[in-house]
């Protein structure tokens, strides 16, 4: 059996790679732990090729050699790679001996085989060395220090999870001949072979040129003795994922990500409330902040993550969605809290410029749908999002963006009202819904429906309320108790309508009932 690594190149697909090495696609996916057929440039795939008996007698019995024992007749399905491995020669040697300009073969073609030629291509059999796990080791750390991948380590050692124990002995692959992967002997002072590393969370950042000292932060920087914020990871029998993460204040916490059909869900732990002064700098009034706190209660926490629905990757207390609001959130974090953004996202290789997100480990991906699909597939990249939920400066940016994208548009959306006297009035939502409770409801509806559709639903319900109560003036409608508005909205949305699915009536009813049951707690006054 021969084991080798194939770096994914432009145009590669699982089918083309399988055809190139004459292996099965399902074997490639199983060996590399792939859940889909999506590949990324620079990704290293393990390839295992079963060698056939290449002795002259066996080859002759299979009809591979003619009577001179120096020729091979190409059979259906054969490739240069398979033939080279069987005869223990290199692909380049076969091409040179036969004046081949490409790897394309045709059935019946007769190839000259130099069976004693040395192997000169990078396709090498694999040996192994032993590595003993010490305190502080993780699969990511071991893979990085030995120039291999987490997938390779799991495969070679039949690991069912990433949990390690001190003293555990792991196999690490070492190729024979030429450059090794990883080297058999300790590396000399000269630079090691260039091998694209796996995703590394929070690698050390080179010291930048002297710059003006930034204002002090209440969150101390990452402990310089630790080059990774991800201290451990493991799965349970239900394939839920547990990440041990070092926060910026050096506290270590374990986060459980619930495995779903198409991804993971993290309900989040970060619940701290930013200071009054911090919120004021982001342009929020206490009432808007308190209204958004209600959204936080029903949507998630500051570090909440959702990668299993149509949003690809959603994050934060308002569940900012990839490609749009999440891009804007990261840009806001980098603009208004550059130091904290650098300590979390940029140390993990995630950055944003002009609203476009990029990842250091996937430099060729620029399409924003594809970049978020890539982030979704690399659970190590979840770490900075979780860290950011515990950094006040970055949490404040969630409020700044939520205010700009949802609060202001929702409360400024225009209502089209029909009053009891036949008057038709167009007025902003905020001119009718003035209480904290009804404004929180409007913003929560705007998050789920969009501000304009939310205004249409409210216009219908409030017009119906005006007709039922014979309200002929806008001020009387605006003075209606918030409980009455919530109750009437619930009753109005309970009646089936043609656009029921788009109205998301169940969510609107649930939000209104939540406000009726527990109200909207006042956090800042």
Image: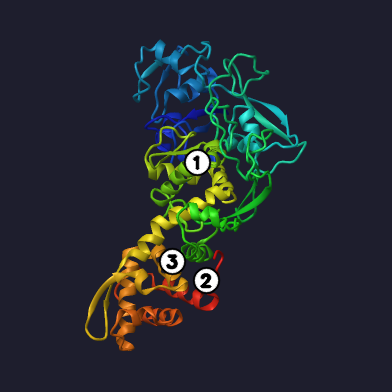
> How many marks are shown on the rendered structure?
3
Q: Which residue is mark 3?
A: 444
Residue 389, percent across and down? 56, 51
Q: Nearer the viewer, mark 3 or mark 1?
A: 3
Cβ–Cβ under 8 Å for marks 2 and 1? no
Which of the 4 quarters of the picture holds residue 311? bottom left
Residue at 66%, 20% in the rendered image: 184
Query: Is disc 1 placed on a helix, strand or loop?
Result: helix
The label shown at residue 520 is 2
Question: Splitting the image into 4 quarters, where does residue 161 fall?
Answer: top right
Residue 276 is situated, as x and y percent measured from the top left of the image, at 55, 57
N-terminal-most mark, 3 or 2: 3
Label 3, label 1: how far apart the Cα atoms are:
42 Å
Q: CA distance from mark 3 to mark 2?
A: 12 Å
At a point 55% along the width and 21% down the height, the residue shown is 124
| Structural crowding at the residue carrying mark 3, measured as other residues with C-alpha within 10 Å and reported as few (<14), some (14–19) or many (≥20) | many
Find numbered disc 3 in the image and state the secondary structure of the residue it sits on: helix
Which of the two discs, 2 and 1, labels the residue nearer the N terminus?
1
Quadrant in which the N terminus appears: top right
Most foreground residue, 4 or 388: 388
- Locate residue 488, reporting x and y percent: 39, 82
The crowding category of the residue bearing disc 1, from other C-alpha atoms within 10 Å (few below 14, some 14 to 19, many at least 20), is: some
The residue singled out by tag 1 in the image is 29
117, 483: nearer the viewer: 483
| Quadrant placement of the C terminus | bottom right
Q: Nearer the viewer, residue 325 or 135?
A: 325
* Dot 3 and dot 2 residues touching (CB under 8 Å): no
Q: Is residue 262 visible?
A: no
Relative side of 217 to 421, left or right = right
| Residues under numbered marks 3 and 1 in contact, where contact means CB atoms less than 8 Å apart | no
Determine the residue located farthest toward the right in the rendered image: 167
């Amino acid at each position: 059996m021969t084991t080798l690594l194939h770096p994914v190149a432009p145009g590669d697909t699982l089918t083309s790679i399988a055809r190139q090495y004459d292996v099965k696609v399902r074997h490639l996916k199983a060996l590399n732990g792939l859940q889909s057929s999506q590949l990324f440039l620079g990704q290293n795939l393990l390839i295992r090729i079963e060698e056939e008996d290449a002795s002259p007698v066996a080859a002759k019995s299979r009809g591979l050699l003619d009577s001179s024992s120096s020729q091979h007749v190409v059979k259906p399905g054969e490739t240069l790679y398979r033939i080279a491995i069987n005869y223990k020669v290199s692909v380049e040697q076969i091409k040179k001996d036969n004046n081949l300009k490409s790897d394309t073969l045709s059935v019946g073609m007769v190839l000259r085989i130099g069976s004693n030629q040395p192997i000169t291509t990078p396709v090498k059999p694999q040996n192994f060395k032993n590595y003993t796990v010490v305190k502080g080791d993780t699969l990511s750390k071991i893979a990085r220090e030995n120039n291999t991948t987490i997938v390779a380590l799991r495969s070679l050692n039949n690991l069912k999870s990433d949990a390690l124990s001190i003293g555990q002995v792991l196999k690490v692959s070492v190729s024979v001949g030429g450059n090794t992967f990883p080297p058999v002997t300790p590396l000399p002072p000269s630079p090691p072979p260039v091998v694209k590393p796996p995703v590394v969370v929070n690698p050390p950042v080179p010291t930048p040129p002297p710059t003006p000292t930034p204002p002090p932060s209440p969150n101390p920087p990452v402990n310089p003795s630790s080059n990774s914020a991800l201290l451990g990871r493991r799965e349970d029998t239900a394939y839920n994922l547990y990440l041990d993460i070092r926060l910026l204040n050096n506290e270590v916490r374990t986060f459980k990500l619930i495995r779903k059909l198409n991804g993971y869900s993290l309900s989040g732990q970060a619940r701290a409330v930013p200071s009054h002064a911090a919120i004021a700098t982001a342009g929020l009034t206490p009432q808007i902040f308190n209204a958004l706190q209600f959204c936080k209660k029903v949507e998630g926490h500051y570090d909440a993550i959702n990668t299993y629905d149509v949003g690809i990757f959603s994050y934060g207390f308002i569940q900012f969605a990839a490609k749009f609001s999440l891009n804007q959130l990261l840009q806001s974090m980098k603009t208004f809290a550059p130091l904290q953004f650098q300590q979390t996202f940029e140390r993990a290789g995630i950055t944003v410029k002009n609203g476009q997100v990029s990842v250091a480990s996937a430099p060729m991906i620029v399409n924003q749908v594809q970049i978020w699909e890539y982030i979704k597939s690399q659970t190590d990249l979840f770490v900075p999002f979780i860290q950011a939920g515990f950094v006040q400066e970055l949490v404040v940016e969630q409020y700044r963006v939520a205010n700009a994208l949802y609060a202001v548009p929702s409360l400024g959306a225009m209502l089209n009202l029909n009053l009891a006297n036949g008057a038709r009035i167009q007025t902003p939502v905020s001119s009718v819904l003035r209480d904290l409770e009804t404004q929180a409801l409007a913003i929560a509806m705007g998050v789920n429906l969009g501000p304009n559709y939310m205004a249409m639903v409210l216009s219908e319900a409030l017009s119906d309320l005006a007709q039922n109560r014979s309200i002929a003036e806008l001020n009387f409608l605006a003075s209606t108790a918030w409980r009455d508005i919530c109750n009437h909205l619930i009753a109005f949305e309970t009646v089936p309508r043609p656009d029921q699915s788009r109205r998301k009536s169940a969510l609107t009813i649930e939000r209104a009932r939540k406000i009726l049951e527990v109200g909207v707690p006042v956090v800042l006054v």
